Image: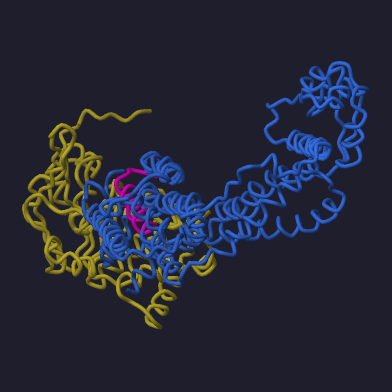
Amino acid sequence: MKKIWVVFIKEFLDIVRDRRRIILTLISIFIGVPLLLVLPYGFIFGRMVRQTSDAISIPVQGMEYAPALIQYLEEEADIKAISAQNVRELVLNKEYAVGLIVPPGYEEKIRNGQTVEVILIADERRSIDLTRERLIIMLNQYESVLLTERLQKNGLTGEYLEPLTVLDENVASETETTGSLLGLLIPGVILSFGLGAGMPVAVAAVAGEKKKLTLEPVLFTTISRFDLVVAKFLAVVANILATFFLTMLSIALSLGLFILVSSRVMPREITNAQSAAEDAAASAKPAMEGWIQGYHIEPLAIGLFLLAPLIIVFLSAALQIMISSWARNDEEANTYLMPFNFLSGGVFFIAFFLDEFVPQLWHYAIPIFGTMLSMRDLLSDKIDPASLTVMFVSSILYAAGMLALAVWMFHREEVVFRT
Amino acid sequence: MIEVENLSKRFRQKWFKKFTAVDGISFRVNDGDVIGLLGPNGAGKTTIMRILSTVLTPTDGAARVGGYDTRKQAKQARGCLGILPEYWGLYERFTPREHLRMFGIFYGLGGPALERRIDELIALFEMQSYADRECKRFSKGMSQKVALARTLIHNPQHILLDEPTSGLDVMSARQVRGLIADSKKLGKCVIVSTHILSEAEKLCDRLILLDAGRVVAEGTPADLLTRTGKPNLEDAFLSLLGRTDVEVVS
């Protein structure tokens, strides 16, 4: 046991003392992750806030035909209308996000109770643009005002136009609904991390040592090959877990920072906001709160959820050690391990195809896939002993088998001396 | 004592071909003896060293180190053997002291006894000034000293040295030669694999000349000179290998 510990510590110190690697890892985790998370979302979020709450200008062709509409937009939605001749060209040239064309005779048709076609010009190449939605909602609101006036003139109420109301009922519980949504992202992120991380350590600990000729002197000593492989395997596992926890910490800090900054910025922006897009956001808020407040999973499910990927980390570490043992040197090991990057990337997307998939018990025995199914179940607080047993037992067997294979490889002289 | 009996090692190559690195070699090294394994590149010296160190298994024959069969009692054999490989294989981010501590633990040592042994070896090889510095930028001589100290950490009875003075400056090489001579005095069993014939002549009681995995000649340096009738060991070496056509390039 002491020998395993010494090799484990040696591998650990080898990582920690590699200043370049440590600095790059810390930069990636504590600068790269926040930049990737906060910057793009902060940019998108800020833009959306500006688009929904700031005063905007829109070009209007035929502005003189609809003074009442223009007055409504300017007073109710902080939208400044600018008279223009060719709105299509202005929008196409990206001078404005949206524009409006009011046909001649607008006012007369409205007065006579006829339908008028107002054309909203937008450029849908602008992927993140709420200005169009803001204008549509304002126009719809204005339409409602006109409609109410017309109904009142004829002695009718709003119910006259609404003979049927649809009530939405969800057969899934709030926990199941939220769990299904979380299941799209979280298991994929965790598992792809578990499969992808740890590779540099696995490569350096075996193939790298072969290349640097540091492995042979260790094999001359009385340490057993089993102890040596187990220690290196544990070092890879520890590295995956350490990187994972640091990344999660970084994500948590980034999100915390994002929320803090947003909460400071949001109230000031929102007090001025009069846009209808806000109303839409406000109507969506109770639903979101309902999901979060109604979501509840048992501590046992949380425990099992955390345990499930740990076994995949063992499996992945054993597989990486085995491949690294087979390789002649670190370059070759990196080449052999390249498919792992694709696999870890691919795992992330599996969840998106699982919506209509009804798993059978044997599906839980498929390595990684079974774990993903179980993690999805657990996120919905579904603790099914049969499927969990199949997943845990099969995953442990795969991991143990892979470790045994790695130990066997280490005993083969044609593998150890393939330099 | 190290005994090698009818030792053979064949390696599998591509397309079911086999390569014989060692072919039916036998020799014996008594305690207090220093023998030199000589031979051109590919003669099988390193393969013999690796079989004795138990990291390679012989295809035929047997090797025993201190009475322990390298195949059946590998761990015990390794326990009484100290090996200096040709390439030192030092961890560049570890200090000499850490190397010695780690390898000491691998050999089952520990506690104050191990620390005392580490200090003893640091003093013996005069490594005090760099014992706690990472090995990253060490010179060849410094690295060789660390590797030698690592070889001797468990005070082995049997010592295998592969090219122990290769690339060393005069001072360091002299120190290594002194160490081999001291080991002989202490009754240790030493095998030295070397290309440096003058060194082999000075240090070794007996020389084993290998070529293509076989023993070409065996005896004391004086025996080999008498047998070939050559004035020096280099000419005797070439004569025994049947390569008298090798000329000096000037």
In the image, is A376 to the left or to the right of A100? left
Query: What is chain A's hue in the picture?
Result: blue
Identify whether A404 is placed above or below B113: above
* Rendered-image quadrant of the N terminus of chain B: bottom left
Image quarter of residue B220:
bottom left
Nearest to the observer: residue A22 or residue A215: A22
Please report the residue visible at 33 percent of the width from the left and 68 percent of the height from the top: B152
Q: What is the chief secondary structure element of the magenta stretch?
A: helix
Looking at the image, can residue A295 be seen?
A: yes
In the image, is A244 to the left or to the right of A405? right
Which colour assignment does the render follow? by chain
Image quarter of residue A252:
bottom right
Identify whether A136 is placed above or below B135: above
Nearest to the observer: residue A224 or residue A63: A63
Please report the residue visible at 84 percent of the width from the left and 27 percent of the height from the top: A110
Image quarter of residue B229:
top left
Nearest to the observer: residue B148 or residue A318: A318
**Range shown magenta:** A312-331
Please report the residue visible at 47 percent of the width from the left and 61 percent of the height from the top: A241
Task: Report x, y in % for residue B25.
Answer: 10, 50
Task: Report x, y in % for residue A122.
Answer: 74, 26
Q: For residue A255: magenta?
A: no
Query: What is chain B's hue in the picture?
Result: yellow
Please report the residue visible at 81 percent of the width from the left and 54 percent of the height from the top: A265
